[in-house]
């Protein structure tokens, strides 16, 4: 049996020990390097997360409503100034017959003096009547500081120089509420008691005895033929 010489065996053992030690140091060094990179990476991420966490979230502003409340207009004006009633050529018949049978229509547009437009109020009172004296009728309405139209209750009475019972109403009444935003209309026949001649249809508009105005139009009345 052959044996290795002692010197060579010793040398082999020392070389192995050095190799093992060197390998071990290299492993530890590499491990430390890897650990350093890994630790630095963790530190960077942690710092980034910390910075982000210090931000204060921005709250969204509440919505603002732009809705405006509606305003309801007053239904009835507090003060109604009455302008001269408007009566057109087609609003009445210029020649009428007192036969008690033929139907006639008279219309008047009551106007607001401030706007010159049809009244919107519903508490204006109108009266229609027949007279044979234009001037005397106007004078009577003006008498005693307009005493007649200054009291609405007077409208139900016969006016001075009124031809009483002349108008026989088939639609509407002699004294009635003036129409708001439209024409006030009467339908009537002429009584057989009315004599032939020249007459005037007179219309008066009165707001609570405070403001009033009137207008007269001329017509010719003929007696019925037998």
Image: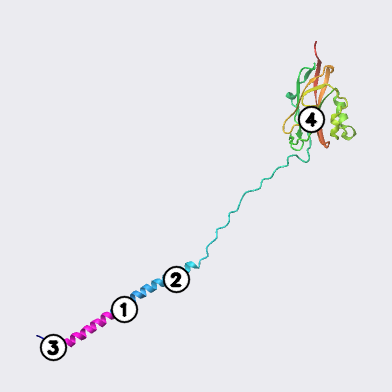
Label 1 vs 4, first from the N-terminus: 1
Q: Gap between marks 4 and 3, in whole Å? A: 153 Å
Location of mark 2 (residue) = 47
At label 2, counting other C-alpha atoms closer than 10 Å, the crowd grade (few under 14, some 14-19, many 20 or more) is: few
Label of residue 5 in the image:
3
Residue in the picture at 31% in, 79% down: 28
Residue in the picture at 44% in, 68% down: 48
In the rendered image, the vertical position of residue 62 relative to residue 102, given as above or below: below
Q: Gap between marks 3 and 1, in whole Å? A: 37 Å
- Tell me if label 4 and label 2 are in contact, CB under 8 Å: no
Q: Gap between marks 1 and 2, in whole Å? A: 27 Å
Task: Please state which of residues 31 and 140 is positioned toward the viewer in this rendering.
Answer: 31
In the rendered image, the vertical position of residue 15 relative to residue 49, given as above or below: below
Q: Gap between marks 1 and 4, in whole Å? A: 119 Å
> Does dot 1 land on a helix, a strand or a loop?
helix
Per the rendered image, the range of residues in magenta is 4-25
What secondary structure predominates along the stretch shown in magenta? helix
Q: Quadrant of the N terminus?
A: bottom left
Name the quadrant containing residue 135.
top right
Label of residue 176 in the image:
4
Q: Position of residue 154 (x, y in %)?
A: 86, 31
In the rendered image, the vertical position of residue 57 relative to residue 174, given as above or below: below
Label 4 vs 3, first from the N-terminus: 3
Location of mark 1 (residue) = 29
Q: Is residue 17 magenta?
A: yes
Name the quadrant containing residue 130.
top right
Label 4 vs 2, first from the N-terminus: 2
Q: Gap between marks 2 and 3, in whole Å? A: 64 Å
> Does dot 2 land on a helix, a strand or a loop?
helix
Q: Gap between marks 4 and 2, in whole Å? A: 93 Å
Residue in the picture at 18% in, 87% down: 11
At label 4, counting other C-alpha atoms closer than 10 Å, the crowd grade (few under 14, some 14-19, many 20 or more) is: some
């Amino acid at each position: 049996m052959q044996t290795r010489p002692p010197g060579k065996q010793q040398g082999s053992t020392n070389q192995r020990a050095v190799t093992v030690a060197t390998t071990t140091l290299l492993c530890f060094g590499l491990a430390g390097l890897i650990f350093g990179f890994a630790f630095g990476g963790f530190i960077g991420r942690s710092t980034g997360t910390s910075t982000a966490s210090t931000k204060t979230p921005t709250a969204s502003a509440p919505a603002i409503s732009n809705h405006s409340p509606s305003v309801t207009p007053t239904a009835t004006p507090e003060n109604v100034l009455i302008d001269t009633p408007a009566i057109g050529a087609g609003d009445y018949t210029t020649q009428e017959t007192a036969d008690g049978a033929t139907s006639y229509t008279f219309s008047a547009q009551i106007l607001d003096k401030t706007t010159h437009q049809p009244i919107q109020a519903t508490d204006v009172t109108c009266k229609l009547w027949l007279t044979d004296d234009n001037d005397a009728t106007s004078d009577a309405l003006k008498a005693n500081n307009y005493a007649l139209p200054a009291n609405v209750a007077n409208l139900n009475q016969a006016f001075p120089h009124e031809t009483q019972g002349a108008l026989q109403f088939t639609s509407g009444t002699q004294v009635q509420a003036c129409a708001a935003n439209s024409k006030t209309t009467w339908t009537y026949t002429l009584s057989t008691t009315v004599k032939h001649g020249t007459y005037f249809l007179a219309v008066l508009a009165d707001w609570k005895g405070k403001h009033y105005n009137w207008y007269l139009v001329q017509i010719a009345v003929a007696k019925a033929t037998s």
